[in-house]
C-alpha cells in the first residue's frame, strides 16, 4: 500500500491528495494508483520470467477501462467470464490472443462472440459445455481452443463463498474424470485441446493449497501425454491473497517458487489469472462522514458510501482498514464505532465495532484495499448512482468513470 501515504497532512494517492480529488470529483469515489497496478503486474512477470508465461488479469476484480488499458499497455492479457467482459477487454485494447474465457455458464451467444474475436482459449468447466462449444464452433466453421478446468479437490482455506477448489464446488471437472473428458474433447471436430486450467479460490494466504493443486495438475498433464493428448498450456488461475489487515500473503516470488518446480519440467506455457493481487491494494474508496449517531449501546458514523458501493463487508464480513484523509484526524482520541452507509439494510456497514480516532461530520475517510471487487460489485440499490472512479498517475489524475447521474439510473427504462 506504499502508494497511499500522508503528505503535507493529507492522505495522498501517489502525488495527489485524496482531499483534492474529493473536492473536485465528489464522494463516494474510488481512487486507483497506476504505479501500484503496474508494480503488482511486474512482480508476476519477474517471478515467472524463467518460463514462457502470460499474465491474464482477471477482469472481474475491476473492469474499468482505464484499469484494463493500463494493464494491457504493460503487456497483460485478460481472463474474462462473460461477453460483457470480452467487450470491455477488447475496447480497452487487450489483444484477443491474450484473452482466456472462464465461467461455468457461458451462453452459445457468448461462445460465438469469443470465437469471432479469436481469443486464446476457452476454459471449459463441464462436459455439457464442451458439447455446446463443439457444436457452436462447428457451426461457425472453426475449432475452439480449449483448456479443461479441472477441480483438483483441495481445500483452500478461505471464505466459503470464494473457495472453488473443493470437491463440492460448482467449478471445474473433478480431476478423476478429467482424462475421460479430455479423450472426448480430443475426438471432437469443433474442439482443439491445448491446455489445462485450475482456479482453487480467492484471497489465499498460504502457498500449500497451490502446491497441492499444481502437483495434481502436473500429474494429469503427464497422464494425458501418455494417451497422446499433448497439453502445451497450463493455466494456474488466480487467487493469491492480499493484506487487508494482518494477513501475510505469499509474494508472487514465493508463489512462483512453489509452482515452478512442478511446471518447469513440463515445458509448457504458464498462464496466470491474478485479479485481487493486481488491483486490490491499488485502490481506495473515499467517503465523507455525514452524521454521528450516539446511543447508549453504540456509536454510529454514517458515511455517504454504502453496501451498494462496497459490498465486501456485508457479503463476506470482510475487513477494510479505514483511515482519516486529514492526518490531524489520526491524533484524536479513539472510540469504538460502526461505520455504516445510508442504505435501508442493517447489513449496510463498512466496519463494525472498529476502534477509530473520533470521526466528525464532514470528515473524509479512505476505505483501504478497495480496488478489487469494489466498484465491480457495486449496484444501484436504493437508486443510488454509482461512484466516480479516478486513476492517479503521479501528480495527475483522470476521471476514468464519471459519477452516474439520475438520468443514467432510468436510462433504458420506459413507461408502460
Ligand atoms: C475470480 C477468478 C480469478 C481471479 O481471482 P483473484 O482471487 O481475484 O486473483 C481467476 N480465475 C478465475 C477462473 C476466477 O474465477
Image (cartoon, rainbow, N blue to C red):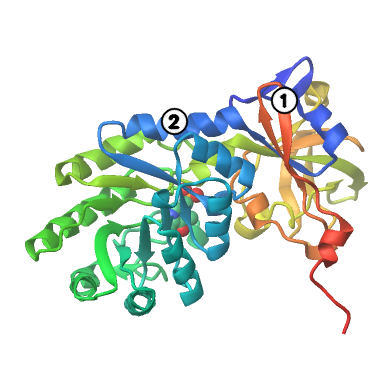
Q: Residue 42 carries which label?
A: 2
The residue drawn where x is 49% and y is 70% is: 110
Looking at the rendered structure, which numbered label has been put on residue 333? Answer: none
- Looking at the rendered image, the disc whose residue lies closer to the viewer, 1 or 2, is 1
- The residue that appears at 38% across and 56% down in the rendered structure is 199
Residue 287, located in which quarter of the rendered image?
top right
- Looking at the rendered structure, the secondary structure element under dot 1 is strand
Is residue 359 shown above or below 78? above
Q: Residues within 10 Å of mark 1 (few under 14, many from 20)?
A: few
Mark 1 or mark 2, earlier in chain? 2
Q: Is residue 384 above or below residue 261?
A: below
* Residue 364 screen position, x and y as percent: 83, 34
Report, in whole angstroms, how far the alpha carbon at label 1 lies from the one at label 2.
Answer: 22 Å
* Frontmost residue, 307 versus 112: 112
Image position of 135 (left or right of 22): left
Regarding residue 195, the answer to whether it shows in the image is: yes
Label 2 secondary element: helix
Disc 1 designates what residue? 396
Q: Which image quarter is the N terminus in?
A: top right
> In the image, residue 168 lies at what x, y percent?
38, 71
Disc 2: CA contacts within 10 A as few (<14), some (14-19) or many (>=20): some
Q: Nearer the viewer, residue 416 or 156?
A: 416
Amino acid at each position: 500500500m506504499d502508494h497511499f501515504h500522508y503528505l503535507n497532512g493529507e492522505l495522498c494517492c501517489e502525488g495527489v491528495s485524496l482531499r483534492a480529488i474529493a473536492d473536485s470529483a465528489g464522494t463516494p469515489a474510488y481512487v486507483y494508483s497506476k504505479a501500484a497496478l503496474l508494480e503488482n503486474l511486474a512482480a508476476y512477470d519477474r517471478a515467472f520470467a524463467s518460463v514462457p508465461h502470460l499474465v491474464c488479469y482477471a477482469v472481474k476484480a475491476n473492469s474499468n477501462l482505464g484499469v484494463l488499458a493500463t494493464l494491457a499497455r504493460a503487456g497483460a492479457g485478460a481472463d474474462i467470464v462473460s461477453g460483457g467482459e470480452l467487450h470491455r477487454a477488447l475496447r480497452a485494447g487487450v489483444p484477443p490472443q491474450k484473452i482466456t474465457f472462464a465461467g461455468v455458464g457461458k451462453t452459445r451467444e457468448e461462445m460465438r462472440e469469443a470465437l469471432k474475436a479469436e481469443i486464446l482459449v476457452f476454459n471449459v468447466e463441464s462436459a455439457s459445455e464442451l458439447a455446446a462449444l463443439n457444436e457452436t464452433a462447428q457451426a461457425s466453421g472453426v475449432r475452439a481452443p480449449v483448456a479443461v478446468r479441472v477441480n483438483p479437490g483441495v481445500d483452500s482455506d478461505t471464505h466459503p463463498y470464494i473457495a472453488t477448489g473443493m470437491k463440492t464446488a460448482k467449478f471445474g471437472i473433478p480431476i478423476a474424470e478429467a482424462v475421460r473428458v479430455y479423450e472426448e474433447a480430443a475426438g471432437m471436430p469443433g474442439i482443439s485441446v491445448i491446455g489445462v486450467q485450475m482456479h482453487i479460490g480467492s484471497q489465499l494466504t498460504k502457498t500449500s493449497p497451490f502446491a497441492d493443486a499444481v502437483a495434481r495438475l502436473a500429474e494429469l498433464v503427464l497422464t494425458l501425454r501418455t494417451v497422446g493428448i499433448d497439453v502445451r498450456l497450463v493455466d494456474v488461475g488466480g487467487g493469491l491473497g492480499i493484506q487487508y489487515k494482518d494477513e501475510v500473503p505469499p509474494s508472487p516470488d514465493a508463489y512462483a517458487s512453489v509452482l515452478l518446480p512442478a511446471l518447469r519440467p513440463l515445458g509448457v506455457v504458464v498462464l496466470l489469472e491474478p485479479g485481487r493481487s493486481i488491483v486490490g491494494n491499488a485502490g481506495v474508496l473515499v467517503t465523507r462522514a455525514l452524521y454521528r449517531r450516539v446511543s447508549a449501546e453504540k456509536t454510529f458514523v454514517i458515511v455517504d458510501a454504502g453496501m451498494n458501493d462496497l459490498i465486501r463487508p456485508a457479503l463476506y464480513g470482510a475487513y477494510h482498514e479505514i483511515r482519516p484523509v486529514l492526518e490531524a484526524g489520526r491524533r484524536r482520541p479513539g472510540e469504538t464505532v460502526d461505520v455504516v452507509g445510508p442504505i435501508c439494510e442493517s447489513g449496510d456497514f463498512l466496519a463494525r465495532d472498529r476502534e477509530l480516532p473520533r470521526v466528525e461530520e464532514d470528515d473524509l475517510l479512505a476505505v483501504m484495499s478497495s480496488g478489487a471487487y469494489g466498484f465491480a460489485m457495486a449496484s444501484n440499490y436504493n437508486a443510488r448512482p454509482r461512484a466516480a472512479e479516478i486513476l492517479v498517475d503521479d501528480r495527475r489524475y483522470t476521471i476514468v468513470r464519471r459519477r452516474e447521474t439520475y438520468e443514467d439510473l432510468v436510462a433504458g427504462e420506459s413507461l408502460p
